[in-house]
Amino acid sequence: MALTKDDMTMHRTYKDDVTGVVGKLTGIGNFDDGTDQGLLQPPVDKDGKVPEKRWVDVRFLSFVD
């Protein structure tokens, strides 16, 4: 079942089922095209670099924890 913006919880970990990106939800937005999107912050990588945040359509997100 697809998630909606109302199902989202800030700072919880989600996975983008399309790309496989996993990260903490740091923002929720509603865009002009009518889509609800969550902003994911992936964890720091093995080299200590902070990956860029990614906007993902909430329909493609699933809970990880």
Image (cartoon, grey):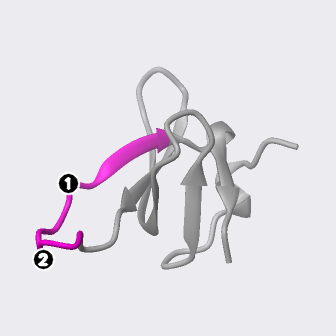
Q: Amino acid at mark 1?
A: Glu
Give the image location of residue 28, x and y in percent.
46, 56
Q: Is residue 19 left or right of residue 39?
A: right
Find the residue positioned furthest to the front: 46
Q: Residues within 10 Å of mark 2 (few under 14, many from 20)?
A: few
Image quarter (top left, top right, bottom left or bottom right) of the C terminus: bottom right
Residue type at tag 2 = Gly
* Tag 2 residue: 48
Relative depth, front residue between 17 and 45: 45
49 is within the stretch colored magenta: yes
Q: CA distance from mark 1 to mark 2?
A: 13 Å
Q: Is residue 46 above or below residue 59?
A: below
On residue 52, which mark appears? 1
Q: Nearer the viewer, residue 41 or 26?
A: 41
The reply, left or right, for residue 48 in relation to residue 59 is left
* Residue depicted at 55% across the width and 72% down the height: 13
Q: Are marks 1 and 2 in contact (CB under 8 Å)?
A: no
Disc 1, SS: loop
- Indicate whether residue 52 is drawn in magenta: yes
Figure quadrant of the N terminus: top right
The magenta span reads 45-56
Q: Secondary structure at mark 2?
A: loop
Find residue 62 and report its image quarter.
bottom right
The residue lying at 44 percent from left, 65 percent from top is 23
Examine the rendered structure and indicate whether residue 54 appears above or below residue 28.
above
